[in-house]
Amino acid sequence: MACIETDILIVGAGPAGASLGCFLTRYARHLQLQEHHGPTLLAMQHLVCLRNQNLPNLPTYSESLCAECLRDAGLEDECRSVSTPRELIKFYRFCHTMAGKELSRSYYAGNDPHREGEYKRASPCEQADLLQSTLEPILLRVATQNGFKLRWDYEFISFCEEKETGKVHSTIRDILSGDMLTVVSKYLCGADGAKSAVARELQLPFHDTPGSGFALNVWFEADLVCQSTISLAITGRLQANTYYLFQSHMMAHSAGLIHMVLAPDKPQPDYCAIAIIRQVKPFSEWVISMLAKPGITEVTASQDEIIQHVKDLLGDPSVKIKVKSMTTWFIQDCYAEQYARENVFCLGDAVHRHPPFNGLGSNTCIQDAYNLAWKIGYVQKGWASPSLLKSFSAERQPVGKAVVRRANKTGTIHAQLFSLMGVFEPDLAKKRKILDRLEENTEEGTEARAAFQQIIENLDSERHGFGVEMNQLYQSQAIWADDEPNAPPSFSTPEKADLHYLESTYPGFRLPHAWLRASNAIPSDPMISTHDLAGKGHFTILTGISGKAKWAYAALRVNIDLSVEIPVYSIGVGDYRDVFYDWSKKKGVSEDGAVLVRPDRFVAWRSNGEDRDPERNADRLITVVSRILGR
């Protein structure tokens, strides 16, 4: 049997595997296997995260944390250039059909005028809509151009570990020839999706609630662009980046990402109690996720019948459609109790799967990879002990669990709304009567409208769940909070924690963002974020002008003793000017103090700088960094 040796074997090249490969290129050589014959061709993954069995066809929604990971890899501009900007994913609607009566619309993805400033203050990155089929080749290109070896059409079978060396021996099958080979690696990373063979072989313990539904996805083209828009473009009278002002005859004033369609005027097939229509490409490609009636587990309708139902959901017989694919999937409520054992790790959908709400699936996958990459890299370089790797599961498992629980909680709110609207009522006349109550000038109508409005408002945690996305508190041996006199800051209620982001430099929190100007900058120079000073594979210290000398000395001592470089930047006066005074409000330490930031831009430790003795400060920093790195 042929044998290959490599530092790291990654199984899977979806969002988790491709991003892990991309982030690891700073540190090690590795091999990646993918069972399929190339990157994702379907329009997979988006805000409504449906990727439970490698089947759903939704794009990826890039929230701020995920975009920051791509920014650190130098890919933000490229990814943004091929994504749909947030102005074009502005609304979330409930309607009879796409072209029919609208029951409600809400702002979405940071577009709410009451929330927009909060999003902009919190991150240097804006949210956008990016196809998985577009993102994956970008990540894989960067990885392969930097020493990454990628093999398609290989299937992971099993693994075993050598007790003496700790190396992992993986058995792999060449799908095309049927030949078997062995890959010997220091680390094995299972990023192979919801049916993860690595997680199965690792025998990870799962919290798995029985599936709560069945669905059909239809990915289709529908050319909705009106003739006047085309002619204006040809004559050159359209300015760049203004095409979305025209959009289409159907969507001219409804640039929404998500459209919940009830279609109450016709009997609904068993496979479609309610339809979620979302934009894939503005405004020519769409995906309809049809959530089946309770108890339905398969589609028996013909393709022609399904296409006719798609037309009914659009509500405009003049629209011509071309179906690109149809796939089925099951809603899941599943997360792993732990993500790793020894030198084998699982990440992404292999360890967390959830229903199509809140849309944090692929974003969480990429964040898993971002957390794991620097840790494997530091151990591989000899800068950290293998014990650092234990912090991956300790830090990321609570995040995955919270995302799954939040998605299912949102699903419960949706179920309340569906019940109120009679979605699952089999009798069409009764269903229309239930919906008509929303427009009746009666006491019943008033109560129904109030209930409907309240549930729509309760769904704000899905449309603008900024706290769900951003409030990740890491607690592990890779975080030093021993010097903190108080517990971590928190919101007064879970509802506020879901909706709003809590900024802090308390150890374990994400580094707060603040726009800065280099001290020698000229007016034409762009601003720089605190995030741009951190990351890039190294620890960072942020301090004030009076702390710069002593913390630079302390960082030098760390480099001498531990061979770990830590750049030190003074903010306020010195290296960078805090021109908006945002950092002064967020830093949480004095000008003598220091905020130690990990390579993944989470705060590792902070000091208020009361001790002015440079040797004692250096000794303390060495102690802190040593424990964080398991040394």
Image (tube, rainbow, N blue to C red):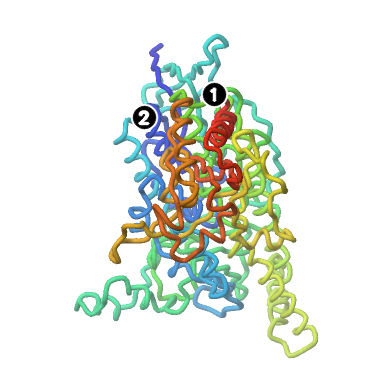
Q: Is residue 431 above or below residue 216?
A: below
User: Which secondary structure, mark 1?
Assistant: loop
Identified at 19% across, 78% down, the residue is 235
Report which residue position mark 1 lands on: 385
Q: Nearer the viewer, residue 233 or 470?
A: 470
Extreme front residue here? 613
Q: Residue 535 at what x, y percent from top left?
A: 44, 43
Q: Residue 102 at what x, y percent from top left?
A: 57, 78
Quarter of the image with the N terminus is top left
Extreme right residue here? 443
Relative to 543, 228 lies left or right? left
Report which residue position mark 2 lands on: 151
Quarter of the image with the C terminus is top right
Q: What crowding class fits label 1: few (fewer than 14 Cα within 10 Å), some (14-19), or many (20 or more)?
A: some
Extreme top residue here? 164
Relative to 425, 542 lies left or right? left
Mark 1 and mark 2 in contact? Answer it, CB < 8 Å: no
The quarter of the picture where residue 164 lies is: top right
Disc 1 from disc 2: Cα separation: 30 Å
Q: Nearer the viewer, residue 556 or 321?
A: 556
The quarter of the picture where residue 387 lies is: top right
Relative to 77, 347 lies left or right? right
- Residue 578 showing in the rendered view: yes
